[in-house]
Image (spheres, rainbow, N blue to C red):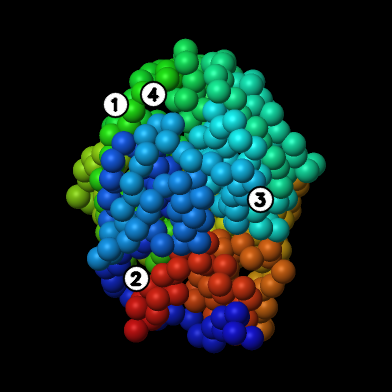
Amino acid sequence: MANTFVIRNKIKPFKKKIFVSGDKSLSIRWVLFSSLSSGISIAKNLLMSEDVMSTIQAVKKLGIKVFFKKNLCYIHGNGINGYKIKKGTIINARNSGTLGRLILGLLINTTEPIKLIGDKSLSKRDFKRITDPLKKFGATFKLKKNSLPLKMLGLNNPKPITYTENKGSAQCKSAIIFAGMKTKGKTYIKAKKSRNHTELLCKYLDLPIKIKSKKNYDLIEISEVKSIRPLNYKIPSDISSSAFFIALTALTENSEITIKDVNINPSRIGVITIFKRMGIKIIFQNQRIYKNEKIADIFVKSPKKLKSINCPSYLNSGAIDEFLIIFLVAAKCNGISYFKDLSELNQKESPRLKLGSKILNQIGVKTITTKNSIKIFGKPNLKINKKIEVKDFMKDHRIFMTSVIAALSFGSQWIIHDKNSINTSFPEFLNIIKKLND
């Protein structure tokens, strides 16, 4: 059982300062932008996870030189149209939806057929949301039931498009932006609010992008990009990874934590807003702007009691990767918490709404779920007195980490399978847990 993790005791109260790994979304985007640049880009604190390494392997297959030296990553870009594609090229996105979806936009003007594959989990996810808009540019696709594997053929002169993105998918929006960068003319996107890392990097690099922000959506105009300068970047820490330690602190009496240098992009901190409404004391310290991204140290103190929440849907897109750990905190709230309009959760590495509910039921918490909502009947005095085993969760890294936080917070003996799943996004997770337990 080498790939299982066993926990036998609750964590003791702690007061710690920690660093978490680099932001996954920014790490992947740094690799992609740098691969299009003219010159050498350098990154510090690049997340060394499987998703990021898959992205590096993908651009290397496209003729880009990548090397590491003294904890730095160097990428030698060949220019905006510098990919060198061999006949029969196959790109393996493995478990990374961000890579799999964004890379298709970058390949819009590729006239050599390319095959995109992924692992079992990624191969069940929807790619039609990406291929539909890219077809409007003129690309052609062959998909297996709207999913991977797929074959793509781009074209020399893609035509600009006007597209409405109404799912709140930053991956879809970013793929269209990348395709628009390689298209003569102006591409227009009306996009439901979602993460805006791609737009902020475009602005920082002085690329021809215009954005008008409305209440519920953004109007984005992107013109053809002639060249991109190299991007030297110290990747800030990941808010999604930080959320697990915020939750652990909230669920552990008399505990405090400071998480250093975290990306607090407003499109990513729905989890912070939700946690604050549940009564968790969270303070942003040492706030600053770095390459258009907001950065801060996050201070957290465990509350005396947690409050239930009727979570408004407009917070969903800013917390879509954190709902599993939010559900866990709701399990100890006083009252019934309600979360709705969460069908997008089932477009992740696993059907997270279903599996998140299953874990809560395992630990004795009542839930009522539909295809897009969940009610959680909180138990403020929740304690577990039976052995818990968590398995068959499609190797979803966030389910593994949520289960570890549950075990440390509520006690009893836990056997959690697929430990290696954390390599997808947060290989250092268990090392930091150990430091908190020392």
Q: CA distance from mark 1 to mark 4?
A: 10 Å
Q: CA distance from mark 4 to mark 2?
A: 50 Å
Is there a contact, CB below 8 Å, between mark 1 and mark 4? no
Q: Amino acid at mark 3?
A: Ile
What residue is at 56 percent from the left and 81 percent from the top?
5
Residue 337 versus residue 214 in the image, above or below: below
What residue is at 78 percent from the left and 43 percent from the top?
144
Residue 1 versus residue 208 in the image, above or below: below
Q: In which image quadrant can residue 22 be found?
A: bottom left
Q: CA distance from mark 1 to mark 3?
A: 33 Å
Q: In which image quadrant can residue 411 be found?
A: bottom right
Q: Amino acid at mark 4?
A: Val
**Label at residue 255:** 2
**Label at residue 206:** 1
**Label at residue 117:** 3
Q: Amino acid at mark 1?
A: Asp
Q: CA distance from mark 2 to mark 1?
A: 44 Å
**What residue does disc 4 label?**
225
